[in-house]
Amino acid sequence: MAKCDNCGSTILFGGKRQGNLRFCNARCAGQGALLAISQQVPQNIVSESVLKVHQGPCPKCGGSGPVDVHVHHRIMSALVITSWRSTPQISCRSCGTKAQLIDTGISLLLGWWGFPWGLIFTPVQIVRNITGMLRGPDPLQPSSQLEKSVRMSIASQAVARQKAQPAATPAAPLHP
């Protein structure tokens, strides 16, 4: 099955295409231009920035790292309406586990109440959280998800700097 080039989720039906990139929805497709720019960032700059983030303090609690991407999964249902999501979070393992525990609790309480998707996807989201808590990213080296996130952040900052630069003003005509 195809994977979204932005968020990495599995594309079940259709999706959106931009050149050779494939996206799961319009929101991810909106990131297509930034994704293309991020691929132009030199690898040495990305590698240096990834190591700084990985070995730096946790952006959530300020505690010591290693810092990486921890994904927490949630589902909520009400009769025929079911909503599920997976949220990546750059943090230390402790903050990542806390987010996974919270979403496991929410899913246990609110996930089952929709038919049929709540009954089907609640166990899936719970197992995904438990797996993330038990395994998690390798603390000795940054994950590819962290590299992609840092690469996108560098590209986003470059685009913001580009937009912030004032446009060149035309020279005023000379008056005799």
Image (cartoon, rainbow, N blue to C red):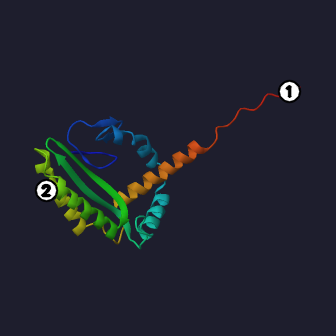
Residue occupying the point 18% across, 47% down: 77
17 relative to 13 in the view: left or right = right
Q: Which percent across, then down, holds residue 2?
A: 24, 44
Q: Amino acid at mark 1?
A: His
Q: Nearer the viewer, residue 20 or 140?
A: 140
Residue 142 in view in this figure: no
Tell me the residue that label 2 is attached to: 123
Image coordinates of residue 125 in percent, x first then y, are 19, 56
The residue lying toward the viewer, choosing from 141 and 161, is 161
Q: Classify the position of the N terminus by image quarter.
A: top left
Q: Going 17% across and 60% down the picture, which residue do you hit? A: 127
Residue drawn at x 44%, y 65% as measured from the top left: 53
Above/below status of 91 relative to 81: below
Q: Residue at x 57, y 44 (%)?
A: 162
Give residue 163's quadrant in the image: top right
Looking at the rendered image, the quarter that the C terminus falls into is top right
Task: Identify the secondary structure beneath mark 2.
Answer: helix
Label at residue 175: 1
Classify residue 30 by image quadrant.
Answer: top left
Q: CA distance from mark 2 to mark 1?
A: 77 Å
Q: In x, y percent, where is residue 35?
A: 41, 45
In primary-sequence order, the first of circles 2 and 1 is 2
Instruction: Determine whether label 2 and label 1 are within 8 Å by CB.
Output: no
Name the residue type under label 2. Answer: Pro
Q: Residues within 10 Å of mark 1 (few under 14, many from 20)?
A: few
In the rendered image, is residue 134 in sight?
A: yes
Q: Measuring from the top left, give residue 32's x and y in whole percent.
A: 39, 41
Image position of 16 (left or right of 34)? left
* Mark 1 secondary-structure assignment: loop
**Residue farthest to the right?**
176
Please tell me how crowded label 2 is: few (under 14), some (14-19), or many (20+) other residues with Cα within 10 Å. Answer: some
